[in-house]
Amino acid sequence: MAKEFDVIVIGAGPGGYIAAIRAAQLGKSVAVVEKWRNPSGTLKLGGTCLNVGCIPSKALLASSEEFENAAHHLGDHGIEVSGVQLDIAKMLARKDGIVERMTKGIEFLFRKNKITWLKGHGKFTGRSDGGYHIEVSGEGETETVTGKNVIIATGSKARHLPFALVDNRIVADNEGALSFDSVPKKLVVIGAGVIGLELGSVWRRLGAEVTVLEALPTFLASADEALAKEALKQLTKQGLKINLGVDISEVKASENGVTVRYRDKDGGDQALEADRLIVSVGRVPNTDNLGLESIGLAANERGFIEVDDGCRTKLPNLYAIGDVVRGPMLAHKAEDEGVMVAELIDEQKPHIDYNCVPWVIYTEPEIAWVGKSEQQLKAEGRDIKTGQFPFLANGRALGIGRAEGFVKMIADANTDELLGVHIISSNASDLIAEAVVAMEFKAASEDIGRICHPHPSLSEVMREAALAVDKRALNM
């Protein structure tokens, strides 16, 4: 007899496993279908984010920052260090150890919440009055299970270029770029998006000469212009060579390296030779081979599943979250959608304000924002006022040697409601949380300006930027 569950989640990434946990907390019988295997062939939970995305990349970012500090910046503190050496194998082992700890943690949470892990590939085979029928295969005997409610949380995969065959040795996507066994002397990155900039920063700090090729004529087009301009300045100063408006015509790889031919923004033909290439040109949703046709559903022309504000598909009791639906491909967005859907299934009334979902790029300095940019608001015809304050005038930032960047706040010119906060600084990923809370509660810039912030701290710049909205910053 087929197993039946109140909720079946297909995919155990951040959206999927969080949805499962919340549904289990609400008393539902829950199963999660997941087929991910690590390089050693072991089945793992956590999806792309925990295994080859957010977690391992941040581990390498931290390690590379420590290496650069020891090799180049400790002298500023009066600490003389010589003979700094890189053990890339140990660095990668540390990264893998963190991943293992996190994925084991999810297995523990599944046991704690009595969630069934169905190991294998999940595919719809039909539906009936009892729910949706899903075939789970790939791990020995195939079985079919039924879910009264189903959440599709299958995530995304790296988009590849037809003329750049990824072997994850010479030509790599995000997975291969996290596991280079040596530091390339010369590295080319195609794509100046979040992943390209983060991975390019890692290998630049470890000693590679890094060139980033971006097709768009503008840098970080989705960010506020002031933020993007400062980010380009800081990353270029660090040694990243960023070329915008390029048109790549050929990628030719060999056993020993790769040649990239392209036309630059001025129309000139260029060629770059490198030891390795990272292709980072976005991601595409994992909606193929799900058997959607068997239940009368189809992905759109871009591979996404159409949903409403509650992540409901056009079919009853069928939901989709995370990278397979509209909106930014962010792990924390997927998590919030997972919680929302679990609570909708429980007949609660949750909601998500997508304008309050923060963005973060984990370069150094970090880049983070929430809400709308100045150019977006001006295009809408909104009457706004802005305030900006630099970390160069902050004692804590100077003390830790991280005085680059600023906080920019944008408020409605009439009501003072906070409309956007844009940060480039060390620890911007943590500082942005204050702005998210403020915007969720429809705070005014004055509200942040009147809140006591600890001194000395980086968070003081948040207050100063808020005060600057009304031209009353105290420390500049």
Image (cartoon, rainbow, N blue to C red):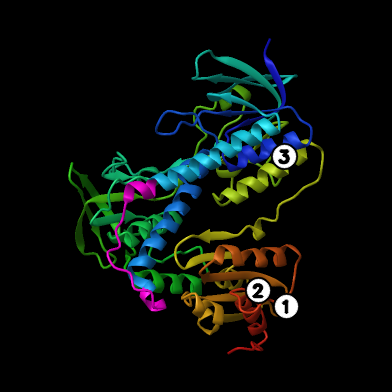
Q: Residue 304's spot in the image, x, y percent?
A: 55, 40
State the residue in front, 27 or 121. Answer: 27
Tell me which label, 3 or 1, sits earlier in the chain.
3
Q: In the figure, 48 relative to 83: above or below?
A: above
Q: Secondary structure at mark 1?
A: loop
Mark number for residue 452? 1
Q: Residue at x 42, y 66 (%)?
A: 219
Q: CA distance from mark 2 to mark 3?
A: 39 Å
Q: In the figure, 284 relative to 41: above or below?
A: below
Q: Residue at x 53, y 24 (%)?
A: 120
Q: Is residue 163 left or right of residue 457?
A: left
Q: Residue at x 37, y 66 (%)?
A: 70
Tell me which label, 2 or 3, sits earlier in the chain.
3
Amino acid marked by disc 1: Cys
Mark number for residue 22? 3
Q: In the figure, 48 relative to 37: above or below?
A: below
Q: Secondary structure at mark 3?
A: helix
State the residue in front, 121 or 270. Answer: 121
Q: Residue 114's spot in the image, x, y percent?
A: 70, 29
Q: CA distance from mark 2 to mark 1?
A: 30 Å
Residue hosting label 2: 382
| Membership of 137 in magenta stretch | no
Q: Residue 337's spot in the image, x, y percent?
A: 66, 45
Bounds of the magenta segment: 75-92
Mark number for residue 395? none
State the residue in front, 235 or 316. Answer: 235
Q: Quadrant of the N terminus?
A: top right
Amino acid marked by disc 2: Arg
* C-beta proximity under 8 Å, tags 2 and 3: no
Tell me which label, 2 or 1, sits earlier in the chain.
2
